Amino acid sequence: MSDEKPINEPIDIPGWWIEDLHYGYRQMLKIDRLHYDSKTDSQRIMVFENETFGRVLTLDNILQTTEKDEFMYHEMMAHVPILAHGAVHSVLIIGGGDGGMLKQVVKHRAIGRIVQVEIDPEVIEFSKKYLPMLSDGAFDDPRFELVISDGAKYAKEAEDSFDVIIVDSTDPVGPGKALFTEEFYTDLSRLLADGGVIVTQNGIPFTQADEVINTMAAFRKLFVDYTCYTSTVPGYAGGQMCYGWGTNDPKLREVPLEVLQRRYEAEKLDTRYYTPEVHIASFALPKYIRDLIPERESLTRPAV
Ligand code: SAM
């Protein structure tokens, strides 16, 4: 949300957590039990228990992930690009300190290298302690390499190459702001291997249309094929969640159902949201979302 927009009058209701992400529209969750509330160098971290969502993680008072609905987000951000690609050897995760994304990525046995760049080591440490079900031991996977750094700095300086890049960021406020700029996406595109794909957390288009508009405007300049796909995640209030998709291989979006099914079964993935059918359906966009994506007349690689 841009700094010029009006903000809600602060309110305090004892025993309730209140998210003020949008003007005139609040989300409230009852705090059944507070597990953790502290400020790091980068942000305020909270973990509490809620009957509907289980353990809830918030950063700077914005909901990040919850025990009960995290699979709807992490499975779709990890398995869609990895199974569409079909021969992924290396994955870069930017953000994702709770470990939920990593848990899905390590399920793919053919992947040899997984690098995660997280700005705040405390998110990882306290997630291991208070939300162990999210990473489920994935931080101990021998293929995992942790880099503690600003993802934007890493993208500018790294010389690596990855088949899949997943930007599991906070909203574009505070440290997360740098992960929504054209400069960052340009730097990331340099790290993408031939035939690779990048996916990004792009918020709820009903309330955060700017995230889709800005990311897609940047992707249009950087990639031959760019679009969004969606899933619904109840904790991210306001409707469907959008994930940005950018690649120079348009065929990744046209992988037939039978091929996705074969790849899915070969990996013996135990998913609760992702299925090959949902994978294909997730690219069918409601018109109000499709209208946020700028068109390009022909699919020829743009000059970068
Ligand atoms: N799924 C969540 C959502 O949609 O809001 C995001 C979850 S994950 C906890 C986001 C992570 O991004 C956090 O651990 C945060 O510390 C990290 N992060 C924020 N800004 C960052 C930056 N500039 N570089 C690297 N990591 C960053």
Image (cartoon, rainbow, N blue to C red):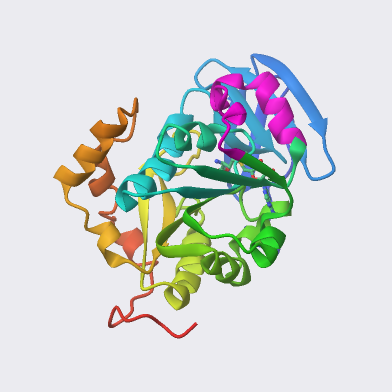
Characterize the magenta stretch by its predominant secondary structure: helix
Tell me where the magenta segment starts and ends, as one range. 122-144
Q: In the image, residue 298 lies at what x, y percent? A: 28, 82
Above or below, 59 against 47 in this view is below
Residue 55 in sight: yes
Above or below, 199 against 60 in this view is below
Say which quadrant the N terminus sits in: bottom right
Q: Residue at x 41, y 34 (%)?
A: 109
103 left or right of 295 in image? right
Q: In terms of depth relative to the viewer, which is nearer, 158 or 64? A: 158
Q: Was residue 140 drawn as part of the magenta stretch in this picture?
A: yes
Q: In terms of depth relative to the viewer, which is nearer, 196 or 202? A: 196
Quarter for ligand 1?
top right
Q: In the image, residue 60 lies at what x, y percent? A: 72, 41
Q: Was residue 288 drawn as part of the magenta stretch in this picture?
A: no
Q: Residue at x 50, y 65 (%)?
A: 215
- The answer to which image quadrant residue 159 occupies is bottom right
Q: In the image, residue 168 lies at what x, y percent? A: 55, 47
Q: Residue at x 53, y 15 (%)?
A: 51
